Image (cartoon, rainbow, N blue to C red):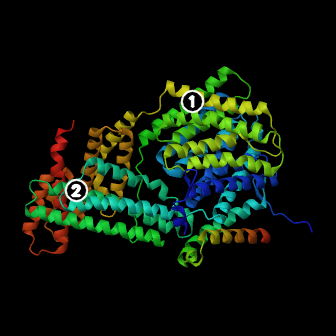
Amino acid sequence: MTAAANRLPIAFAGFPLAAWAFAIRTWASMVLALYVAFWLQLESPSTAALTVAVLAFPWRGQGLEKAAYRVLATIVGLIASIVIVGLFAQTGWLLIAVLAAWIGICVYASSLLDGFRSYAAVLGIITVCLVAIEPLDTPQTVFDLAHERGAGILIGILSVMFVNDILFAPDYFPEIAARLQALQAKVAALAGSALRGVSISPEAAVALLRDITALRPEISSLSTETSIGPARGAAARTAMVDLVAELQASRSLAALTGSPNSASRVSSLALDWLSSELRQSGRDVEASIEALRDGTAPRDPHRAPLYRSRRIALANAVRASVYFVLGAVALAILGWPSTSVALAFVGILIGLSAMSPNQNAATVLAFVAVPVGCLFAGILEFVVLDGVTDFPLLAIGLLPFTVLCALIMSIPNPASVSLGRALLVFTIAVFSPSNPQAYNPQSFLFACVFLGTAAVLLFICQLFLPPLSDEQKLKILLTEARQDAVPAVLAKHGQHGRHDAMFREAVRMSQIVAAAGEEAPLIKKALGYFDGAAALRLAAAALEMLPEDLSGDLRERAAFAVAEGDGQAILAVSDAIISSATDNSRSIDDAVAALAAAGELLALAAPKKEDAP
Amino acid sequence: MTPVFNELVIGGVMLAPVVSSVVMTVVIMLVLRPILRRIGFARLFASPAIAEFSLCIAIFSLLTLSM
């Protein structure tokens, strides 16, 4: 029912009905959160409203997953704030150094994670900024602030959960299943042409790899949706891994069909084996998508690991710490009163931009969203409400701003999603609803000036020390891809982990594509490493499949050829094993066919490898 | 009758009873989830989301009343 509701073709003012429903849910959650926070007489009801702004998602699972990480990260952040302020409150610049180190640690963790886990790491920074840095001159209030913030967040989360459940927010799994199905249709079309011997263009393969791996952060939301969510999450992850395996099998098959020595006996065995592997992974994908829809666990679950580049994470972490120290120095030189508020905003903006794959774009987004958010808050406070004290009027006043931001968020484009959320968060943060509302133009102006100063400061800091550029990222990723594509590294994965390891490299491949943009030669080079690693891993898996009773000499020759990564030698050994075999048992056929397929693929890649610098 | 509050005291810091109820509800829900999955709880209701949320509220209320 929910999936059908999501696809209703009815639109109003250019937005589908589902987007309007999402906007109304967001507004209702915000009003409920504010009402409860006012009723409980919390000191910072704006935290509850901000939590709703942060957790507003069109689907149920996403909001719940983010809420879980928000609670976890808030607890960690609050403990860190109390410890840091407790130990270093009187130490002057040492305190700034410790805070910068904390920001560095959180950015490092955020760069190693994806999706809402990355957000949780950034929330560690935001919590410390709001609880420890903003009241830097009054450290005795830290514990009370921590308490109030925790209560506000809890109320925000409960409001979102309640409204989403009562107003039937759609489940996320039908959307994920539909996207996996669409990807499967594309991969199956490529597989069909590969079986007919038509080659697959690198651009098409890379685009598909990118689309498949882009689902990874989204899939983790399935686990929180209902009690059968974890099974659905496992099924979706397995489908994703099998899709990459199917795509790679199609590409290998297409490459071997066109190779000059495809007429030999070993080659025909290899081709048969690859075709059966292709069909098998196609069936696996279908079974996993079926399991996702049914809510049952997949037969052979995969983990779908993420590729983590420690060098990129370290570079990001060092830069974030330096930006924070530079910001603190600049504010100390300015010598304004209550600059700790601006410093807290600098920290928050550093955290938010670290979460974005393109940090320059994130700074530009802050540049746009901060003034517009301040303008919205100003209009709401001094034109729309202008001194009213009734709660219903506040609720009506919030309606247009919340609905507008939520509608912008519902446009399926990463830039508008970020812009909509940033606008809503900045509007609420500057407006800062409280009971009774102060309507103080001076505090409004201060908030605007501090937020603006923080955005400008971060921009200037990034001019001094630019964030890691795409070229630098590409260089690091390509070096790591080359270092990983050696037999010693690849042999340790074994048969079951082969597809998981391939998926991990597919994630790196899509990171490379994101950094390389339109540079076709670099993408081809990276795809070469990806193919080489996949072939070597296949060879290592084939070695494990060889039967126990195979002669020691042949086994040693095969192991040596695989360790050298020498395609021709692997082919020669495969031929020798076939000739020496007395009975054509199924296991020896499979093992030799897999070995031969790996040998052929490595032999095909070898001339290209010599061309490469 | 004046209600009696059993505060949780950690290192001399008193935490409101609602905090311990919430934490216990979350722990009980986490333990219940695999059991609910096994008995097919989600398939018994038109809206499994509301059913699970209601269960959560029921556990929280019982804990609050019993403490």
Task: Chain letter for mark 1, please.
Answer: A
Q: Is residue A599 visible?
A: no
Residue type, numbered disc 1: Leu
- In-front residue for pair A49/A508: A49
- In-front residue for pair A181/A526: A181
Q: Is residue B27 visible?
A: yes
Judge from the rendering whether residue A498 lies leftward or rightward of residue A1; answer left or right.
left
In the image, residue A323 sits, relative to residue A355, either above or below, namely: above
Label whose residue precedes the other's in the sequence (2 or 1): 2
> How crowded is the residue under tag 1: few (<14 C-alpha within 10 Å), some, or many (20+)?
many
Task: Chain letter for mark 2, please.
Answer: A
Residue type, numbered disc 2: Ser
Q: Secondary structure at mark 2?
A: helix
In the image, residue A237 sits, relative to residue A382, either above or below, namely: below
Q: Quadrant of the C terminus of chain B?
A: bottom right
Residue at 69 percent across and 41 percent down: it is A429
Q: Which mark is residue A458?
A: 1
Residue A568 placement (x, y as % from top left)? 12, 53
Residue at 19 percent across and 51 percent down: it is A565
> How crowded is the residue under tag 2: few (<14 C-alpha within 10 Å), some, or many (20+)?
many
Q: Which mark is residue A252?
A: 2
Q: Quarter of the image holding residue A24?
A: bottom right
- In-front residue for pair A549/A14: A14
Residue A504 placement (x, y as % from top left)? 37, 53
Q: Secondary structure at mark 1?
A: helix
In the image, residue A179 sits, relative to residue A605, either above or below, namely: below
Q: Quarter of the image holding residue A444?
A: top right
Question: Mark 2 vs mark 1: same chain?
Answer: yes
Residue A369 placement (x, y as % from top left)? 60, 37
Judge from the rendering whether residue A364 lies leftward or rightward of residue B14; answer left or right.
left
Asked whether disc 2 touches disc 1, contact meaning CB atoms under 8 Å apart, the reply is no
Q: Quadrant of the N terminus of chain B?
A: bottom right
